Image (cartoon, rainbow, N blue to C red):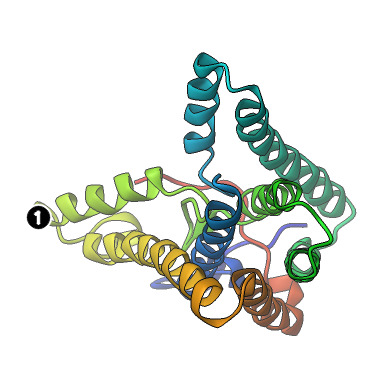
């Protein structure tokens, strides 16, 4: 069964690990790292599929078939990753098992393996980019709630919208969802944007200044840390079902 919100007392709600605000920041940071690698090495996006969809149309009109196939293939890889993760989550939940540790460790191992393969030149960068998009699709499908609210840690257009929505709402009303300040909700979404941007910036920096492909290794290391936290209380790790939009 999926973890439910635990009411400690009427005025305090404790959310599962994967809905913790710091975890949301870290997941967005890892997404930024993945995009840094694919944009730098393969000139495509790992998670921002709106960019790949637009690029697919652009390349199609250009008649640049190799570029079209690559951009469109990245969209498909992301979708397949999401679908496979969906099957995994549904199967485990139906058997009364949690899915968070499995998804986290898969992402750790996948990013580490892709980093090693890229570092040794064993796999073409385009193939690695497909694989990174697959991993990103799995992450985005498994974890998309923060403090009980739907959000995106792999695609941030919706996050930008909600961040500024709550900021505007705070000008008219202090309290928002769950009786919590609208400014707090705005801060949650702005922190996701910060994580995404910081991951992209640091990913480029470590690949250029430290060692090539370091962004994937750093992403794997962060996922290991999250996975270890999840392993301590696996039954309190899965995000809650459903969601709300303010």
Would you identify the image quadrant in which residue 95 lies? bottom right
Q: Position of residue 65 (x, y in %)?
A: 64, 22
Extreme left residue here?
A: 172
Total count of labels: 1
Q: Nearer the viewer, residue 192 or 181?
A: 192
Using residue 59 as the reference point, say whether residue 181 is left or right of it.
left
On screen, residue 226 above or below 84: below
Mark 1: few/some/many CA within 10 Å (<14, 14-19, 20+): few
User: Which residue lies most toward the right here?
Assistant: 95
Q: Secondary structure under badge 1?
A: loop
**Res. 240 image quadrant:** bottom right
- What residue sits 79% from the left and 63% below the top? 121
Is any part of residue 113 visible from this angle?
A: yes
Residue placed most toward the observer, 62 or 14: 62
Quadrant of the rendering where the N terminus is positioned: bottom right
Q: Give the side of residue 221 with respect to residue 45, left or right.
A: right
| Residue 126 higher or lower than 22, as above or below | above
State the image coordinates of residue 212 (x, y, percent, origin top left).
62, 72
Task: Name the residue rendered at 50%, 18% in the picture.
Answer: 62
Residue at horizontal 39 percent and vertical 43 percent from the top = 158
Relative horizontal placement of residue 124, taking residue 166 as reference (left or right): right
Q: Is residue 112 above or below residue 231?
A: above
Q: Quadrant of residue 233?
A: bottom right
Q: Residue at x 60, y 49 (%)?
A: 42
Camera-side residue of 120 and 14: 120
- The residue beneath circle 1 is 171
Q: Position of residue 137 (x, y in %)?
A: 66, 47
Position in image of residue 227 (x %, y %): 71, 76
Residue 13 visible? The answer is no
């Amino acid at each position: 069964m999926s973890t439910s919100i635990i009411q400690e007392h009427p005025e305090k709600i404790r959310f599962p690990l994967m809905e913790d605000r710091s975890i949301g920041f870290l997941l967005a940071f890892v997404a930024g790292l993945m995009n840094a690698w694919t944009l730098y090495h393969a000139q495509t996006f790992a998670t921002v599929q709106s960019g790949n969809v637009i690029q697919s149309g652009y390349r199609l009109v250009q008649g640049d078939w190799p570029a079209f196939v690559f951009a469109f293939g990245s969209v498909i890889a992301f979708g397949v990753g999401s679908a496979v993760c969906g099957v995994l989550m549904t199967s485990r939940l139906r058997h009364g098992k949690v899915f968070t540790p499995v998804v986290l460790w898969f992402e750790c191992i996948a990013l580490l393996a892709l980093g090693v393969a890229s570092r040794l030149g064993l796999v073409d960068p385009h193939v690695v980019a497909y694989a990174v998009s697959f991993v990103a699709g799995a992450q985005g499908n498994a974890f998309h709630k923060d403090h009980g609210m739907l959000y995106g840690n792999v695609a941030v257009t919706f996050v930008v919208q909600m961040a500024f929505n709550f900021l505007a709402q705070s000008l008219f009303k202090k309290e928002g969802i769950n009786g919590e300040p609208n400014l707090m909700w705005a801060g949650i979404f702005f922190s996701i944007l910060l994580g995404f941007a910081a991951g992209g910036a640091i990913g480029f920096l470590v690949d250029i200044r430290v060692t090539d492909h370091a962004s994937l290794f750093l992403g794997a290391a962060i996922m290991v840390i999250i996975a270890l936290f999840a392993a301590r209380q696996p039954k309190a790790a899965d995000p809650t079902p459903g969601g709300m939009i303010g």
